[in-house]
């Protein structure tokens, strides 16, 4: 059984896979363009992209804005016909400025989590850029859709439902993430579908629901497509690719990880996160890691009390300094055992998903 394309408004991705945004710097123009060229939707993480700019330490925000434009333009040069998105955390400072750059550069879609992007419709108004919130419950889907509809007469162009097995920041409390209380992604998808149904019925406009969090194989894809998801978002699996923008040392941390090395951590964002246990995490468990330089990146972070600087930790990790770096990962990060081209991975995922759908049919 052939996979159906992912349709988001007038955008058609032949392969219903969104490559999730991974920051800082793990998914930039190289990975995003490769995924787009393979028929999926490639996504650049827009958080602290200026870390490679020479003036990042002294002129952080301008460096970030400059780097975002560079990465979008480079990705578009490499993938002129592909679908490209940018992931922006709602919790970041200067969200509006960064989102505006995405619109000016004609990015196909802006994806936003770590909070609800209440003003995103205003930013994309009059453009072709699609607005896609990430939610972790039917309640959140209802709230953001109702707000957008009332205030802007706009519905989400798609909704990504991220379950508790995702990497990076998680939209759940620590209590919700306990094994005996952890919600199933299948149930969350149905919750969100039910929450969106009245808006879809009233407007006659489809709102594709995208499944995310812990999706690793083509069989995983097929399972969520069979219950009505229009596509899936995958992040962790793409770390093990040649085009992933992280250092080889970063990728090897996944390859060397065992299942027991994947753990929950406390993040300065105010949300739990999931990462690979290493010397840095052990250090944060023993004492606070002093913040020597505040980049003013997060609305919720106080440099005087934060347990560590998440910008510095993620930057060190992507560069390969794993002793001082935080390595975000999904729950299946330990399954990454090789580094292959994106095109080969996409082909494998599609083939396995189609086989699983055929068996299910």
Image (cartoon, rainbow, N blue to C red):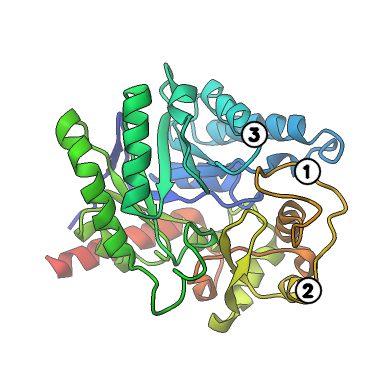
Q: Earlier in the sequence, mark 3 or mark 2?
A: 3
Q: Nearer the viewer, residue 104 or 352?
A: 104
* Location of residue 264 by image quarter: bottom right
3D distance between C-alphas at marks 3 and 1: 16 Å
3D distance between C-alphas at marks 2 and 1: 21 Å
Instruction: Give how far across and how far down residue 152 sits, in percent.
Output: 37, 23
| Residue under the image location 63 percent in, 65 percent down | 266
Q: Residues within 10 Å of mark 3 (few under 14, many from 20)?
A: many
Q: Provide the residue designation for mark 3.
A: 68
| Disc 3 versus disc 2: nearer the observer | 2
Q: Provide the residue designation for mark 1.
A: 295
Q: Provide the residue designation for mark 2.
A: 283
Q: Is residue 281 visible?
A: yes
Side of 179 where 32 appears, left or right: right
Side of 256 where 59 appears, left or right: right
Q: Secondary structure at mark 1?
A: loop
3D distance between C-alphas at marks 3 and 2: 32 Å
Extreme left residue here? Answer: 361
């Amino acid at each position: 059984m052939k996979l159906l394309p992912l349709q988001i408004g007038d955008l058609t991705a032949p392969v219903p896979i969104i490559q999730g945004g991974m920051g800082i710097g793990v998914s930039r123009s190289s990975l995003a363009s490769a995924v787009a060229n393979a028929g999926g939707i490639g996504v650049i993480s827009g958080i602290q992209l200026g870390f490679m700019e020479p003036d990042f330490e002294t002129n952080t925000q301008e460096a970030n804005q400059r780097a975002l434009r560079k990465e979008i333009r480079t990705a578009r040069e490499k993938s002129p016909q592909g679908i490209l998105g940018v992931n922006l955390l709602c919790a970041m400072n200067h969200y509006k400025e960064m989102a505006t750059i995405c619109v000016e550069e004609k990015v196909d879609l802006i994806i936003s989590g770590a909070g609800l992007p209440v003003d995103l419709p205003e930013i994309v108004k009059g453009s072709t850029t699609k607005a896609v919130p990430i939610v972790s419950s039917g309640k959140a889907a209802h709230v953001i859709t109702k707000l957008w509809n009332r205030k802007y007469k706009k519905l989400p162009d798609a909704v990504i439902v991220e379950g508790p097995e995702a990497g990076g920041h998680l939209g759940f409390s620590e209590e919700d993430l306990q094994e005996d209380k952890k919600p199933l992604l299948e149930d969350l998808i149905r919750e969100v579908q039910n929450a969106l149904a009245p808006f879809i019925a009233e407007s006659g406009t489809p709102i594709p629901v995208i499944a995310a969090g812990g999706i690793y194989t083509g069989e995983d894809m097929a399972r969520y497509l069979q219950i009505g998801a229009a596509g899936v978002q995958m992040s962790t699996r793409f770390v093990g690719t040649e085009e992933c923008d992280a250092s080889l040392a970063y990728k090897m941390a996944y390859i060397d990880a065992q299942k027991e090395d994947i753990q929950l951590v406390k993040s300065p964002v105010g949300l739990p996160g999931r990462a690979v246990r290493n010397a840095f995490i052990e250090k944060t468990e023993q004492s606070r890691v002093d913040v020597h330089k505040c980049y003013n990146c997060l609305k919720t972070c106080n440099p005087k009390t934060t347990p560590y600087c998440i910008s510095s930790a993620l930057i060190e990790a992507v560069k390969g300094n794993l002793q001082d770096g935080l390595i975000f990962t999904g729950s299946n990060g330990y399954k990454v055992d090789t580094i292959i081209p994106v095109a080969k991975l996409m082909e494998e995922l599609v083939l396995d998903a189609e086989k699983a759908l055929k068996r299910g049919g």
